[in-house]
Amino acid sequence: MTSRASTFGGDLGSALSDLPLFPLPEVVLLPGALMPLHIFEPRYRAMIRDVLATHGALAVVNVPDPSKLDERGMPVLATVAGVGTILDHVELPSGRFNILVRGRARVALEERPFVPPYRRALATLLATTDEDVPSESLAALMAASSAFVTLMRRRDATFELRAPKDADAGGFADHCAQQLLIDPRDRQAVLEATSVRERVRLVTETLSLQRMTLAAGHGAMN
């Protein structure tokens, strides 16, 4: 068994022209998130070995509907994904891997012709717009996230939102989306929102709706 912390984390440029894709249903990787993954399929074990030997980057790509296939018979993938770098990894005696990925950026994908054993894409970094978020919008997001966390703590006293204290509005919205939004379709919508104002609005509205839905369900059970 081998284990080591990885030193990747610099410029993503060398990875984007032929970025390895790790498709997962109901999984979305947002910038700043830490995502542990267990890699067991032989094709993805090979991918991780390639990634560790080169730039350390891969895209975690949502599979919106695993039953929907493209002309090659492969699951249709979302066209926007989160690109991340491997922070740490353990190779198990079986050849499987446990890895820890940090989300780095949003990318648009143009899939390459398939070369076994795994899929790759030309990835383009998506620029963020509307960096200035009105103070009342940010306050609404903070209130909505706090109210949702309070509700969840009634079920699990240890539940908390982990976000850097110096996170900007877009980063805070991403952390809220990754950790608090229940439906992967909502997380994917936030991933695809390059406007920070739109991202803040989406997360605020979704959290408020989730809280009302869960609170109503909790009341009905009592």
Image (tube, rainbow, N blue to C red):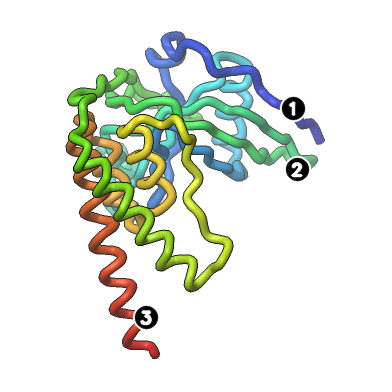
Residue holding disc 3:
218
Left or right: residue 219 compared with residue 90: left
Give the foreground label among 2 and 3. Answer: 3
Q: Residues within 10 Å of mark 3 (few under 14, many from 20)?
A: few
Dot 1 or dot 2, earlier in sequence: 1
Mark 1 or mark 2, whichever is nearer to me: 1
Q: Which residue is mark 1?
A: 4
Residue 132 is drawn in which quadrant?
A: top left
Residue at 25% across / 60% down in the picture? 208
Residue 174 location (% of width, % of height): 36, 39
Residue of label 2: 94
User: Which quarter of the image is occupied by the C terminus?
Assistant: bottom left
Q: CA distance from mark 1 to mark 2?
A: 17 Å
Q: Compared with residue 109, is residue 43 higher up or lower down, i.e. above or below?
A: below
Residue drawn at point x = 18 percent, y = 38 percent: 198
> Which tag is nearer the camera, tag 1 or tag 3?
3
Numbered disc 3: secondary structure: helix
Image coordinates for residue 159, horizontal then vertical, percent: 53, 60
Front-most of residues 132 and 186: 132
Left of 3 or right of it: where is 56? left
Residue 90: give x, y in percent of width and height: 72, 35
Which kind of residue does numbered mark 2 sit on?
Answer: Ser
Q: Residues within 10 Å of mark 1 (few under 14, many from 20)?
A: few
Image quadrant assignment for residue 172: top left
- Does any portion of residue 220 appear in the rendered image? yes
Where does the image place residue 52, in percent across and percent down from the top left? 62, 21
Disc 1 and disc 2 in contact, CB within 8 angstroms? no
x 35%, y 46%: residue: 177
**Distance Cα–Cα, label 2 vs label 3:** 43 Å
Q: Residue at x 28, y 78 (%)?
A: 216
143 vs 192: above or below:
below
| SS of the residue under disc 1 | strand
